[in-house]
Amino acid sequence: MRLRKTVLALAAAGFISTTALAVHYADHATDPERAAQVAPPTAGTDAASLRVALPDFRGIVRESGAAVVNVSTTAMVKMGNQQQGQPGVEPNDPFYEFFKPFMGPNAQKPVPMHGEGSGFIVSKDGLILTNAHVVRDAREVTVRLNDRREFTAKVVGIDTRSDVAVLKIDANNLPTVRTGTPASVEPGDWVLAIGSPFGFQNTVTAGIVSAKGRALPDENYVPFIQTDVAVNPGNSGGPLFNMNGEVVGINSQIYSRTGGYMGLSFAIPIDVALHVKDEIVSHGRVTRGRLGLSAQTVDQKLATAFGLDKPGGALVASVENGSPAALAGIKPGDVVLSLNDTPIRESADLPPAVANLTPGADAKVEVWRDRKSIKLDVKVGELKDAVVAKADKGDSGEAGKLGVLGRSLTAQERKQAGIPSGIVIEDVSGPAEAAGLLAGDLLLAVNGIPITGVGQLRSVLEGAGDRVAVLVQRNGQRMFVPITVG
């Protein structure tokens, strides 16, 4: 699997028994004088009395270990000198020196790259959850069970905003995990992870929950569970269990300056992942609510300036013209205090809360304005999201086969670009990437049919063949790009 070049590395879980023993002894000595009186265990100490202080994970491993799988992938990666914005192996990449002898001055030939991650079975007929970054861009996905059986998996769908992917293998009567409620998890609780760090399948590590509701850079729609479980490359996509043997999260990322575990691991709450799974299986994509505003954290100085008793809420920095927030009367300078009576403690709470709203539904937003609280009614919009990358099931009506992640252009963006319609490409993979499309390109038409939005793009692709001509605009210049999508 790929490691991010930022301090966030993608991966997943550990515990040190001496820590538990230290806590056990501290329970019997609340001050240094009494602590000195506590004798260390001797050879004659009853082993059972020490075991009481330590969590026993064996039952969880026996019950659920067989439902944890290894996920290996093969993707084609362009090597050599790359233009800005194009993928490839860069000089500071750990693989650069290995591939350097094969790189000519203009080498662009894709080469196979292999990655590994983890996953877990959620239905007896072979439905598997993992991370989107584990299987994204993969041309082949192989799932290896604990009993050494291997299956070629289909990518049912991925959701990059939550980093959740759904796989399917052709098997029945498979072992499955039990899922729990992340809301019941509290800091200090013991948790356990099972995964395949560095390819070592069914590796068990443990630790405690460090915090809840963590927001990470560029990850606005997931309130992560932070743990100190030892997570490393290959653990990504594996389950995080509570002491009842229930999955409460998907191990997804670590905070690292080296690419390896440094004591800060982050898991996607399982209720978020199951919602994504249900949406993908039922509708082929994930629907999220949208208000059309940006917000920032309220610190003590801002709280004082706005007349708040203490820092809290989300300060509205900007509101899109014509957005649901604008139509509801929300203004820059408002501080969002609650959404549908659910408190917004900080700006990071707002995006996932809005995303969980149903598009078209009515919502109540409480804001702080002019040193008093007011409530506004808002009609929730829909967050225009990715064309979901789905596996080919034999029908040609899947928009994901193009390999673009995009959104509809706003009126202001259309005016600035001088175009009547189109979508802006936010990311590319598969056929679109191979054809040379880049993030930031404006997709204007397919086979001469103007594209007005992501949904309409899906409709156009339904009637298209395996080869399409895509009209894109880049830096003010337009060009047709032929793409083979079959």
Image (cartoon, helix red, strand yellow):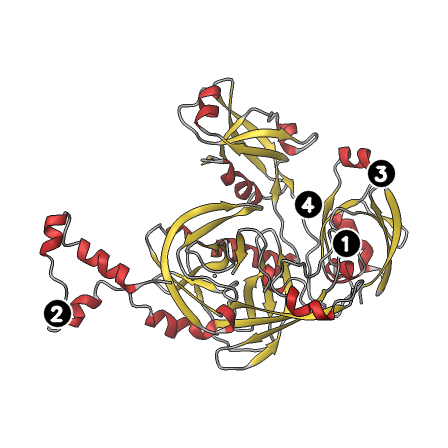
The residue type indicated by label 1 comes to Gln
- Marks 3 and 1: in contact by CB < 8 Å? no
Few, some or many residues within 10 Å of mark 1 (<14, 14–19, 20+): few
Is residue 311 visible in the rendered structure shown here? Answer: yes
Residue 186 vertical position relative to residue 326 in the rendered view, above or below: below
Query: Which residue is pictured at 45% across the width and 35% down the height?
Result: 345
> For the view shown, which residue lies furthest in the bottom direction?
148
Q: Which residue is mark 1?
A: 83
Which label lies toward us, 1 or 3? 1
- Marks 1 and 4: in contact by CB < 8 Å? no
Residue 300 is situated, as x and y percent measured from the top left of the image, at: 43, 27
- The kind of secondary structure element at disc 4 is loop
For residue 55, side relative to residue 164 (left or right): left
- The kind of secondary structure element at disc 2 is loop
Q: Which residue is mark 4?
A: 384
Which label lies toward us, 4 or 2? 2
Residue 120 vertical position relative to residue 295 in the rendered view, above or below: below
Q: Earlier in the sequence, mark 4 or mark 1?
A: 1
- The kind of secondary structure element at disc 3 is loop
Which label lies toward us, 4 or 1? 1
Q: Earlier in the sequence, mark 4 or mark 3?
A: 4
Q: CA distance from mark 4 to mark 3?
A: 18 Å
Q: Quadrant of residue 38?
A: bottom left
Few, some or many residues within 10 Å of mark 4 (<14, 14–19, 20+): some
Residue 393 vs residue 436, the one in the foreground: 436
- The kind of secondary structure element at disc 1 is loop
Q: Which residue is mark 3?
A: 420
The residue type indicated by label 2 comes to Thr
Few, some or many residues within 10 Å of mark 2 (<14, 14–19, 20+): few
Q: Which residue is mark 2?
A: 42
Q: Earlier in the sequence, mark 2 or mark 3?
A: 2
